[in-house]
Amino acid sequence: MSHGRHDVPGNHDIPGNHDVLMSRDVPVSRGVPASRDAAVLDDPVGASLSGHHAHLARRLGGAATYQPEVASFSTVAAGRDGREWADLARLLGRGALADLFSSPATPPPDWEPVFVLEGRQMIWTGRPPAGAGAGVVELGADDVPEMLDLVARARPGPFRPRTRELGTYLGVRDGGGRLVAMAGERLRPPGWTEISAVCTAPEARGRGHAARLVRTLVARVAARGERAFLHVAESNAGAIALYERLGFQTRGPVTFRGFRTP
């Protein structure tokens, strides 16, 4: 699913490129049931903005959102008699996209619905993979132009000029040094890291790059005492099956929604 088109359904970095679906060399891994600390994943955007990503947040009253060049996601606090929606509208501006990610909060009637996408949240329950994947490199600020170009061609989901500041991003280069695959870290609620931006250039798919990048990221997340999670469209049965083979299990359904501010 693409998230490069910011105002259409499917805007939530739903992994599903052909490289993921064609990777078949991943052993089945079964883990333990989700622990109680997974409750923080009910509002991963809010938990990230108030914690690990607080330095990337914009806040006003009961609303918070990321800085525009970092990410589009917003969150509102409950129990403020509706004032939180006015706060968010002021933060975003008139006629702006309010990307509420998986928040169940409902805005006022004059907020125009833009998209609804059914999906599921999956968490890592397998054993951490051993070591880094062969040929995997860490991407930095100098790589952003190439990362943006790859996103434009592979269309994995939302990626902005400063998205890489959310966490570690890894890539694979071909023999000529061109970036042909990448994956990275996005939301960071306490104790967890979301794997995101999994994509492969069309000409390099079917070689297992995406699966190798995901395994490497999972290993890094586990090494710092956290657990990995991700989101996938409910309609993407192939990607769901692949992630299950990698060691992810479904935590529960989510509905992604976006609205336009009045």
Image (cartoon, rainbow, N blue to C red):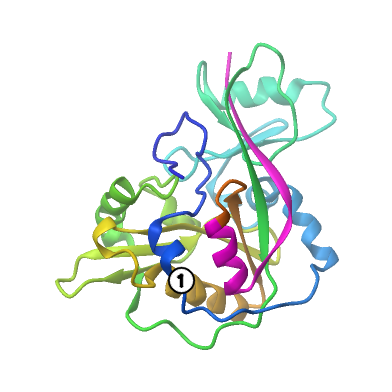
Q: Secondary structure at mark 1?
A: helix
For the residue pair 62 and 8, the one nearer the viewer reads as 8
Q: Is residue 256 magenta?
A: yes
Q: Residue at x 32, y 60 (%)?
A: 141
Q: Is residue 250 above or below residue 259?
A: below
Q: Which residue is mark 1?
A: 211
Residue 127, position in %: x, y?
65, 83
Q: Residue at x 36, y 84 (%)?
A: 134
Q: Is residue 46 above or below residue 193?
A: above
Residue 188, position in %: x, y?
62, 58
Classify residue 178 by image quadrant.
bottom left
Give the side of residue 77 with respect to residue 197, left or right.
Answer: right
Q: The C terminus lies in which quarter of the figure? A: top right
Residue 79, position in %: x, y?
85, 30
Q: Say which amino acid is labelled 1.
A: Ala
For the residue pair 80 and 213, the one nearer the viewer reads as 213
Q: Residue at x 64, y 46 (%)?
A: 119
Classify residue 142 by image quadrant.
bottom left
Classify residue 88 by image quadrant.
top right
Kindly give the residue lying farthest to the left in the view shown. 176
Q: Is residue 92 magenta?
A: no
Q: Is residue 23 above or below residue 81?
A: below
Give the side of residue 254 with respect to residue 15, left or right.
Answer: right
What span is colored magenta in the figure?
A: 238-262
Residue 209, position in %: x, y?
37, 71
